[in-house]
Amino acid sequence: MNLALLVFLICFILIFVIRIPIAPGMLMASIFYFAIAQSPAADISMAASQFLTNMNSKFVLIAVPLFVFMAEVMNTGKVTDMIFNFANAVVGQRRGALGHVNVVASIIFSGMTGSALADASGLGMMEIKAMNDNGYDRGFSSAITAASATIGPIFPPSIPMIFYSMLSGASIGALFIGGMLPGILIGIALMIYIAIIARVRDYPKGAKLALREILGITVKAFPALLSVLVLLGGIYTGIVTPTEAGALAALYAMIVSLVIYKAMGIRDLGTIILKTVKTTGTLSLLVGTAYAFSYIVAIEHIPDLVATWLLTVTENKYVLLLLINIVFIILGMFIDTMAITLVFIPIVLPLVNALGIDLVHFGVLITLNMMIGLSTPPFGMLLFIVSGISDTPLIQVIKEILPMLLVLFIVLFFVTYFPPIVTFLPNLLGM
């Protein structure tokens, strides 16, 4: 190990020890490396040139701010209210009804925003309040909100999958549709758990609605629900690219909130654009610094070294997948999802290719790992979000989410070792 690489790794470790924000931390580590390294390839101008060349060809990244904008519009307008009411009409009559509504609403909302944090912080506040008001334990209400929010980036669209597509070359359309069955499986598994707990704790049943009431709620919610069809239908019919679909869905969400539900004004739109710009700026800084980081990792042949080392431990593909699962769940507990995708995915991709693992299957699998990490105690970000918005002690949330994590791990096992769960639909559609 040369001096530059040693300094680089020490700086990277210090990012977490002294809690430096991940983007400035990676930039600092990279600058120290380029300042010390003697290799001709270790030229910061060369790294910058390659970055600009690369980004100019990654049109799919334009979809990211569009999905961010759409999520902000959904959270500001009455769209989340309509989704919640519709989910309540569909599954809100059984015991533990609001728990089931929580999961179904998350599936629908994730089909619009592709963000676990948007789901938990936007729709989640409404879900937790409704559950607490109806006699559910506060810890349970918060925990099921965090657990169901993991569906966000699994079910299409998915911002992490966009970045994974950029890095791996896997089809973004195939990744999106490959996440549908795993997302639905998570929803079904959580609803089975809710049904069991609801009987044990005697949680209340929902009010029975007449057919006319259900139809009325569905009609009111239809413009909001149609955004899912606009987004996914456009992509899978081939009418638009994922980037164009993001623009189309963002425009549609704006029209629905401004014109149909009249829940937004021009001032609100200005605030939403400002929030979108801030989020996009943060992600752009992360992409740039992560590229410099990944460039150093590549010229030092770290991915090849990691792959070679792991293959000396075991050449069994299934054991290696287990190790990768464990590593990425742990990373998901501590590090931002985008940073994991941009920094650590390039390190394991050579190993994935060497083992002949399908890139679409691996992309959905890694996204699921990172999402489970977000809900894993003691540092999962979703735990802090639901604890904060519900004013529930973190320890109560952790206590309730542990058995839910077991449910998620069971789904993860099947997604890991039965690839057709991911690849069946993309193969069926010839993607």
Image (cartoon, rainbow, N blue to C red):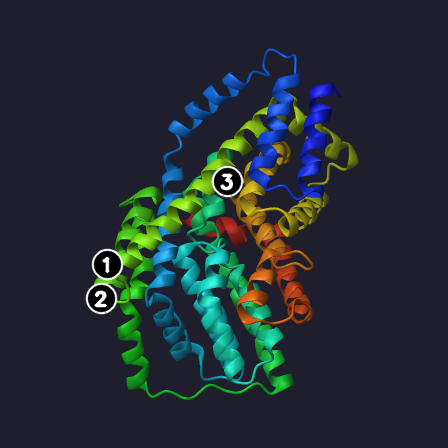
Residue with the mark numbered 2:
260
Q: Amino acid at mark 2?
A: Ile
Question: Quick check: can you spot residue 428?
Answer: yes
Element assignment for label 1: helix
Find the distance from the CA under tag 1 to the CA under tag 2.
Answer: 7 Å
Element assignment for label 3: helix
- In this view, the residue in front, 314 or 378, is 378
1 and 3 marks in contact (CB < 8 Å): no
- In this view, the residue in front, 419 or 273, is 273
Residue with the mark numbered 1:
255
Above or below — where is 75 with respect to 419? below
| Residue 6, x across and y down, in percent | 73, 25
Residue with the mark numbered 3:
164
- In this view, the residue in front, 423 or 190, is 190
Above or below — where is 203 with respect to 21? below
Q: Is residue 219 left or right of residue 399?
A: left
| Residue 18, x across and y down, in percent | 69, 42
The nearer-to-camera label among 1 and 3 is 1
Marks 1 and 3, the one that precedes in the sequence: 3
Task: Give the quarter of the image for residue 356.
Answer: top right
Element assignment for label 2: helix
